[in-house]
Image (tube, helix red, strand yellow):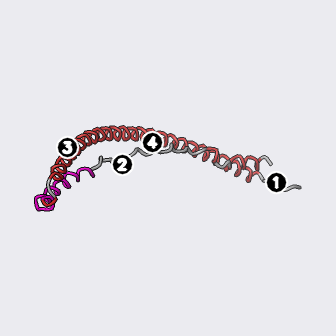
Amino acid sequence: MGIKLIKSEIDRLINLKNDCERADETLSAAINTYNDAVDAAWRTFEDNLRVYAEALNEAQSELSSEIESHDTVLNDAKEYLDALANDREAQISERSERWQESEAGENAQSLVDALREMESYESFEPEFVEAPEVEEPQHIDQGSIPAASGMIESIIEM
């Protein structure tokens, strides 16, 4: 006589198989709920990220426009101060070396130097914030659920 399962063992295995099938179904439903929640959260996040990116772009556009206006004024000022510096340098060079070395000449040269300081001013170039790039989340694959009920079924059929 061979070694076999007795009726009470088979009944217990059938109950375990049924319990595993219900647990699989419950887990499958929970995974679906989770994946649906991930999708809903992603859509909300994506919408908020889009609003964030649009707000950033609008703010950057407005700031860029103001920077352009600022640069125009700055360049006008630089051109005017450069012209004044050139004019004063020409006036200084027309004077004698003795006058240029005098206090009046040194004061005139200090004025030219101050007028030239504006040349070093550069355009304001901020580093703008960029909207982050985010990958869409992955779903949980139901294929990775262990198939315990199938294994128990095969034992019962032996």
The amino acid pointed to by label 2 is Glu
Q: Are marks 2 and 3 in contact (CB under 8 Å)?
A: no
Disc 4 or 2, which lies upstream in sequence? 4
Q: Residue furthest right?
A: 1
Disc 4 or 3, which lies upstream in sequence? 4
Q: Say whether residue 122 is left or right of residue 33.
A: left
Residue at 26% from the left image edge and 50% from the top image edge: 119
Label 2, label 3: how many angstroms apart (C-alpha)? 29 Å
Residue at 17% from the left image edge and 56% from the top image edge: 109
Disc 4 or 1, which lies upstream in sequence? 1
Task: Report crowding for label 2: few under 14, some 14 to 19, many 20 or more residues within 10 A (C-alpha).
Answer: few
Question: Circle 1 sits on which residue?
Answer: 4
The amino acid pointed to by label 4 is Ala
The amino acid pointed to by label 3 is Tyr
Q: Which residues are magenta?
A: 99-120
Q: Main structural element of the magenta stretch: helix, strand or loop?
A: helix
Disc 3 or 1, which lies upstream in sequence? 1
Question: Circle 2 sits on which residue?
Answer: 127
- On the image, the x and y values in percent for residue 56 come to 35, 41
Closer to the camera in the image, 32 or 52: 52
Question: Circle 4 sits on which residue?
Answer: 41
Question: Circle 3 sits on which residue?
Answer: 80
Disc 1 or 2, which lies upstream in sequence? 1
Task: Report crowding for label 4: few under 14, some 14 to 19, many 20 or more residues within 10 A (C-alpha).
Answer: few
Mark 2 or 3: in front is 3
Residue at 84% from the left image edge and 56% from the top image edge: 3
